[in-house]
Image (spheres, rainbow, N blue to C red):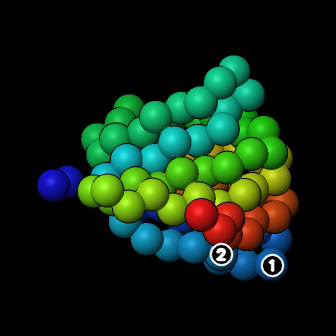
Amino acid sequence: MKTIKVEILTPNGAFLSEDAEFVVLPGKSGELGILPGHMRTVAQLVPANVRIVNGTETKRYATGAGFARIEPSVVKIFTIAARPVQP
């Protein structure tokens, strides 16, 4: 299965860097589903959960407001804060 690199960056530095099969971002206009090979896009993000999916495993990270730069092989999330969400 193809993957896309996901990076969450905060003012304190890199919070996360891992590969994902599918990513869901909390966009200002609604959720954005990102697959590997996605077209280049910049999206404004609202405070909510980012979901990173690999097979049957889904990890959730609470993020603050920010922006995402999406490219075919990487999603870079620039946010004021981030923390893992327990299942």
In the rendered structure, the answer to whether residue 40 lies left or right of residue 9 reads left
Residue type at mark 1? Answer: Asn
Instruction: Check contact, mark 1 vs mark 2: CB within 8 A.
Output: yes
- x, y (%) of residue 35? 34, 41
Residue type at mark 2? Answer: Phe
Q: What residue is shown at x 37% (from left), y 47% (from top)?
A: 22
Residue 40 in view in this figure: no
Residue 49, disc: none
Name the secondary structure under disc 1.
Answer: loop
Compared with residue 38, is residue 5 higher up or lower down, i.e. above or below? below
Q: How far apart are marks 1 and 2 (CA)?
A: 8 Å
Residue at the far left: name it. Answer: 1
Circle 1 is placed at which residue position?
12
Residue 15, disc: 2
Compared with residue 84, is residue 12 higher up or lower down, i.e. above or below? below
The total number of labels drawn is 2
- x, y (%) of residue 28? 74, 28
The quarter of the image holding the C terminus is: bottom right
Residue at the far top: name it. Answer: 29
